[in-house]
Each structure stands twice: as structure tokens, then as C-alpha cells.
Image (tube, rainbow, N blue to C red):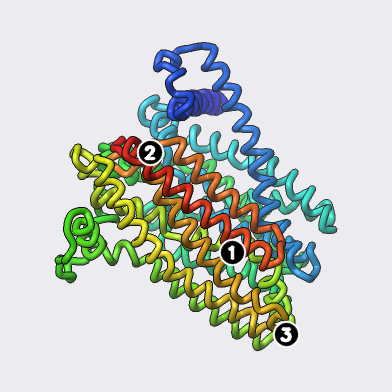
Amino acid sequence: MFKTFKKAFALKNTYRVNGIIFSLKQIPLIKKLLPAVLYKSRGLKLFAGIVSVILELANIFVTKPVYVALMIYLPATLYQADTAAIVLHIFLLMTLIGVIMNSHLFNPTKDKYYAMFLLKMDPREYALSNYGYFLLKSLLGLGASFIVCGLLVGLRLPTCILMAFFVVFSKICFHSFLLWQSQRTGRKTYNENKPSPRIWIAIFAILLCAYGLPLINLNLSETLFYILMVPVIVFGLAGSVYLWRFQGYRRIYKELLSDNNIFFGYSEAVRQANIDTFQKKQLDSSVKVNSNKSGYGYLHEIFVKRHRKLLTRSARNFSIGIGVFLVAALVMIFISPEVAARANRMMLNSLPLALLIMYFVNRGQYVTQAMFMNCDHSMLTYRFYRQPEAILQLFRQRLRTLVAINLLPAMLIALGLPLVLYLSGGTDNPLNYLMLFLAIISMSVFFSVHHLVMYYLLQPYNVELQSKSVTYAIVNYITYIIPFAFMYIKLPTIAFGSCMVGFAILYVILSLVFAYKYAPKTFKLR
């Protein structure tokens, strides 16, 4: 089994090294310096191999501590209660989400296909050795993270150590159960990349309990943790035996990988799936397609009318969710004076948190995908569509539409936050109400412009809607990290709101200038 793992690790490392070289070749300032022959360069291979090892170590000793810090430790410190108890409470519930969404065993990847079906490695040995390595990484990374986090908040050392074992045995319990269920009932194998709507609802409910219950002084206790530890270890050991004896790994992976169409024309299957998602299922055939406009204004209005359901559906759903949450928040404010006091402090000092909320609420990236799949991926093959006048006319039309779509949920938040501030105790400075409203609107406009400008300047998609631009991925990652970092910054609402409004105005002006100047050169089919 170790021999199989060694070969599999070498295969994965080679796959990652070639991916690193490919990524370097996609960066605008570097790609011209790196010819294709470098794929066989031993020196560059060695460098990429070192980077690969560093990434593997970072996955263990960087990503795990960052997860524990951002998702467990820092949120727990925001509550005015026993931090140690809240850390344990959030940990237990977030473990449930991790068990469901991060299994490794049920994650269909190409390296699994290469190993088991091209290189003919033993499926059982490959699956068990790599799953064991995955659990070992989790144990080491989370163990070190929980010890540091737990000791900082006052948990006992044995509890901190057991927390890591709780995660590992919980995964074994759940994943062995899924294998047993699939074998016994013949049901379709669970695919962690395709969670069902019920799973998403369950995850949302767990998140709500994890971060919402401590607000009303309800949290899972350390005693409950020790009680749960006993059955988790018992069933985890039984699950380990079942995983070891299970003989159907080839069938499981054949089903998983064929579901992802790695066997039978991956690109064509991805293309068809995206057509189903962005075209057939969402086309609004009930709308009469007509317009009084001309030229590219006519083209855009026809597009918006035909795809109104696709463009606005997620924004409407978010608006409904936001409305329900605001009503629940207002009820909690009336019921609990303590919650009202915390809400008032948040409205006056934690506006930076809204930046992360607006990042997730904004539908810019989804809408630009729809624009590409339903219009641009075909039209970009024509020279006239890539003329500067055509690009700039459509850009203006689309910017107005995207801002309008995103203002639907943004307006609810922009009106709801001042209302929460007023009903939770108010403020002596009326500017706080105005700044809450203006800051949320500015964030919405900022993200709308940002996603559209990045789409035009970096156009990452090929005809299958696969993103092929590393630069675009890097920009998106930075766009996510910055709001996430602001989550833990506390600034007075007036100060942060004023900066946000000013930055949004400046960013919009600069983005429009860059788009007008460079989009005619960069907006092309990959």
C-alpha cells in the first residue's frame, strides 16, 4: 500500500508541478519569458517541485490554522460571554459542515482518474492510502491549531487534543456510513462537489446555530463534547474497519468520475451542463421580445428581457433571505435588551463587516458568466463585435443593468441597517443613519463595477465556460481576502462609511477609464 501511495503522490506532484508552470505562463508579465520547452526543463521542474512541497506543508500548517483563527477563534472573541465555551460550541457545529463538505474520499478529481483508470493502480489501495494521508494532515494541522487556540481561551490541553481526534473520527463515521448506504441500497454515490439543496439548507441552518445561538446565551457545553466523543470514537473505529474491508472502491470511483464526465468527453459535458444551467432552464419564453432601441442598445435590451429570470433570480432570492433575516433581527431586538445593545454597538462600530456581506450578496460574477454563455461566447467570434465602439456601447448598457440588479438586495440592507440602529437604541449623531445607507449602496456599486471591469479586462472563459485566466483567479482571490480581513476591523461608522464612499467613487472612475482604454484589446475569446 505504501508503494501505491508513493506512486500516487509522485503523480499528484507531477500534476501540480505542470500546473504551476502553466499558471506562471498565464501571468501577463511573465508568460513571454517562459517558452513551452520549459515543461522539460529540470531546473524549472525542481523549482516547481519545491513550490509544490511548500504548498503541501502550507496546506497542513497554514490553511488549517487560518481556518481555526478566522472561523472559530476570532468570531468567538466577539461575544460578550465565556470565550472557551463559545469556541467549543462553534467548533462542534463547524465540524459537521466540514464532515459533509470536505471528505476527500468523495471528491472526484482527475488525478484519481489518472491513477486508477489510466495507470491501473489498485483502487482500494489508492483510496485508502490517500484517504489516510488526508486524515493524517487534518490531525496534524488541526491538532496544532486547536492546541494554540484552546490554550489561548482557557480550554484544557486534553480537550484541545481530543478536538482534532473528534474531527478525524467524525469524518470516518460519516464517510463509512455513506459507503455502507451506497452498497446496501444501490443509491447514487455522494459527490461532495454536487451537494443537494437539502444539504445546502442544512449547512445554512448549522451556520445559523453556530454563530446565532451564542447571541441568546445558548451554546453546546464541554460536557456534551465529552459525551459525544465516546460514540464518535466507537463508530469511528468500526467505520475504519469497514473502510479497510470495503471492496467496491472501483465501482464508487467509476460512478463518481463518470458523473463528472472525465470518461466521456469532459469539455463537451461541461459545455452541455453550462448550457442547461445558463440557457435552457433559465430562458424566459413568456416575455415578448421587442425593443424601441437600436444598435447595441437593442441587442442588450433583448438579451435582458429574454434572460430576465436568469439575471434576477439569485438577486431576488437573496432579497427574500435578507428580508427574513432583518425581520428575525428586529424580533430579537424587541425580545432581548442584551441583543439590542450588541446590535447597536455593531451598527456604530462594525460597518467593515458589511463589506464581506456585500461581497457574497453581489451577483456580478454570476451575471457576467450568464452574459458570456448566452451572448459573448458566440458573438466574440465576429470581428465587428470586438470593435472599440461596440465594446464600449455594450459596456455602458451592461453596467447600468448590473448595478440595478445588485441594488435590489443592497437597498434592503441599506434601509434595514439604519432601522436596526434606530430600534436598538439609536444614536446621538444622525449622520450615522445616512452613512450606513450610503456605505452599503457604495459597496454594491463598487462590486458591480469591479466584476464587470474584470470581466472585460481579463475575460477568463473559453467556450465551455471554464476559467483559463490565472490573473483573473488571483484578482478574485484578493477581492475575497480583503473583505474577509475587514470582517475583524472595528471602526466608527462615520469614518469607515466616508472612506468607503470616497473609495468607491474613485474606483469607479479609474475602472471606467481603464475599461474604455484597454477593453477593446483584452475582451476576446480564449
Q: Position of residue 81 (x, y in %)?
A: 79, 70
In-image side of 189 versus 72 (left or right): left
Q: Is residue 180 above or below residue 107?
A: below
Question: Are the residues at dot 2 and dot 1 in contact (C-beta closer than 8 Å)?
Answer: no
Task: For marks 2 and 1, give the CA distance.
Answer: 32 Å
Label 2 crowd bin: few (<14), some (14–19), many (20+), radius 10 Å: some
Instruction: Indicate the secondary structure of the residue bearing disc 3.
Output: helix
**Which amino acid type corresponds to the residue marked 2 in the rendered image?**
Tyr
Q: Which quadrant of the view contains residue 221? A: bottom right
Q: Residue at x 49, y 27 (%)?
A: 20
Query: Which residue does the image show at 15% across and 69% down from the upper left?
Result: 288
Residue labelled with disc 2: 518
Instruction: Determine whether, in the image, residue 20 is placed left or right of residue 354.
Output: left
Mark 3 or mark 1: whose residue is earlier in sequence: 3
On the question of residue 517 being in view, the answer is yes
Q: Is residue 11 visible?
A: no
Secondary structure under tag 2 reads helix
Identify the image quadrant of residue 99: bottom right
Amino acid, disc 1? Ala
Q: Which residue in the structure is indicated by mark 3?
A: 337
Label 2 vs 1, first from the N-terminus: 1
**What percent of the width, then of the height, locates residue 12?**
49, 28
Q: Is residue 350 above or below residue 59?
A: below
**In whole angstroms, how far apart are the C-alphas of marks 3 and 1?**
23 Å
Residue at point 55%, 40% (across, down)? 131
Crowding at dot 1, Cα within 10 Å, few <14 / some 14-19 / many 20+, comes out as some
